[in-house]
Image: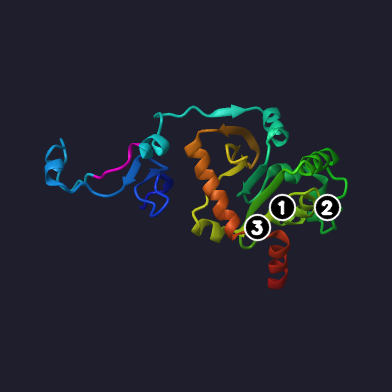
Amino acid sequence: MARRLRFNGTDSGVNGCPAIHEDLDTGEIIVHGPPLTNREDIAQLRHLNQGETAIVVPRELLVDFGPKEVTRVPNIITLDEFDRLFTQFEHTAWRLETRSRYASDELTDTYAQFTRGEPVNWDGVDAAWCAERREQTALGKRFERVRIVDNPPTTGQLYLLDNARRNSAVGEKIFNLWRVDADQLGLPAEDFWIFDSRLVALLNFDDADNLVNVQLITEPPAVLRYSMARDTAMHHAVPYEEFAAQLTAKE
């Protein structure tokens, strides 16, 4: 069975070589780069066995993208600390939403209305949240999301597509991307927020789709990986209005 590899990074901005990948299941590190070819250099290597190849990589590559410890201790923050991130950031807040359902949505009156086939009036829903978003966007801050959608969409995903009208009204920009395209692009299956391209809030859910905790990630190589995923998603996603029109055309 093929490995599940994650691209950690490269110090090369031209051809992407050398680079480091990580096996998500075993934690093993795969490094690729130009081979060491000088016979006198190779002769100095110890324990180089038949079938093995020595490669040359810059020290900076290992410093920037190599693992720093065998077992990383996650930095779990409280939900209050997580909430404060939405007013403390300076420029951009961006989210990738990857789940087929969110249990918290199904507890709301608006979800019940939607599943009954009734039109949802989003005006005034969660007024405090809306007021905060308007306040932050008025300061010039930017909120964006890309929501991954199954084919066919789940009820929860269709609900969020309708909910995008509220997000848009308070200044957020909402985009959608089919899951098959997200998978082909190698986007992570994680839900996360990126704030100012310098810290990541990773949202951890249980098997019942409840938010369990939030993990704060600040290590530059890790933040860079999530930022690369953001750039890829934004390049291929479409505004929710366009996505909704595609669904309507297919019906």
- Residue 225 x, y percent position in the rendering: 50, 44
Marks 1 and 3, how far apart in space? 10 Å
Instruction: Out of 70 and 204, give the one closest to the viewer.
Output: 70
Mark 2 crowdedness (10 Å alpha carbons): few <14, some 14-19, many ≥20: some
Q: Which mark is residue 69?
A: none
Marks 2 and 1, Cα distance to the nearest angstrom?
A: 24 Å
Of the numbered discs 2 and 1, the one sitting upstream in the chain is: 2
- Towards the viewer: 134 or 237: 134
Q: Amino acid at mark 3?
A: Asn
Q: Is residue 243 above or below residue 160?
A: below
Q: Pointer 3: residues within 10 angstroms few (<14), some, or many (20+)?
A: many
Residue at 70% x, 32% y is 88
Q: Position of residue 192 (x, y in %)?
A: 60, 42
Identify the amino acid type marked 2: Gln
Question: Residue 113 location, x and y as percent?
Answer: 83, 52
Q: Earlier in the sequence, mark 3 or mark 2?
A: 2
Q: Looking at the magenta stretch, what is its main secondary structure?
A: loop
The type of residue carrying mark 1 is Lys
Which residue range is magenta in the image? Answer: 55-59
Callout in the foreground (3, 2):
3
Left or right of 124, for residue 231: left
57 lies above or below 216: below
Q: Nearer the viewer, mark 2 or mark 1?
A: 1
Q: Secondary structure at mark 2?
A: helix
Q: Which residue is mark 1?
A: 173
Q: Quadrant of residue 179?
A: bottom right
Quadrant where the C terminus is found in the figure? bottom right
Q: Which residue is mark 3?
A: 176
**Residue behind mark 2:** 113
Which residue sits at x=58%, y=60%?
236
